[in-house]
Amino acid sequence: MKRWYVVNTQPRAEAVALANLRRQGFEAWLPRYRKLRRHARKVEPVSMPLFPCYLFVALDIDDRWRSINGTIGCRKLVALGDEPTPLAVGVVEALQAEADPEGFVDLGNPLARLQQGAPLRILHGPMADLVGQFQRLDDAQRVVVLLDLLGRQVEVRMPLRAVEAA
């Protein structure tokens, strides 16, 4: 019976390891996500591994799993002792269910579902624990929050990680 295992890859060599494992006949999967990269005044989407330096391979423990450790791009199968350690049943299947046919997982934006005016709590910084109103996401993927400060409403921009829905 095939189970999913984790392969530790060399840094930024996940795609090379994936191609070489598939070439050897292994069923391997590299979950990825799309990230916007800014370079030279251009913003372009790039493919990034969901788990840097790791990918998944399905195999029966009786298979020739030791050859994975010598595959170009791979460091080793994650193991406890001498035997590779299988993932819990359903972990990879749940990730695959969230992925599109190309293997991209939509991380989504937790604030994308918020309507303008929804309450947000600031988590970090000098304005921590203040509650404001969600206005929009700006071009730099920062949150614009409307706060009541000193008797007037002020727009404040901050990173996504600095706020949560109140």
Image: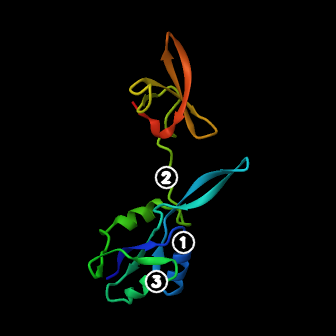
Q: Please identify the residue farthest to the left as the structure is shown.
A: 81
- Numbered disc total: 3
Q: Which of marks 1 and 3 is nearer the N terminus?
A: 1
Vertically, is 151 above or below 7?
Answer: above
Q: How far across and how far down the image is residue 14, in percent? A: 52, 71
Measured along the vertical axis of the image, is residue 104 above or below residue 7? above
Determine which of the numbered discs, if any, sits on residue 13 in the image.
1
Q: In which quarter of the image is the C terminus?
A: top left
Which callout, 1 or 2, points at the residue further toward the start of the chain?
1
Q: Mark 3 points at which residue?
A: 26
* Displayed quadrant of residue 157: top right
- Which residue does the image show at 28% across and 81% down from the upper left? 83
- Dot 3 amino acid type: Phe
| Sequence-first disc among 2 and 3 | 3
- For the question of whether residue 4 can be seen, the reply is yes
Q: Residue at x 49, y 81 (%)?
A: 21
**Nearer to us: label 1 or label 3:** 1
Q: Where is residue 108 in the image (x, y as percent from the top left)?
A: 50, 49
Give the quadrant of the N terminus.
bottom left
Q: Which mark is nearer the camera, 1 or 2?
A: 1
- Checking the image for residue 108, the label placed there is none
Identified by mark 2, the residue type is Leu
The residue under label 2 is 107
Q: Is mark 1 on a helix, strand or loop?
A: loop
Is 37 or 118 nearer to us in this picture? 37
How far is the residue under mark 1 from the one under mark 2? 22 Å
The residue type indicated by label 1 comes to Ala
Query: How far across and how far down the image is residue 17, in percent?
Result: 52, 77
- Direction top: furthest residue: 151
- Proximity of marks 1 and 3: CB atoms separated by less than 8 Å: no
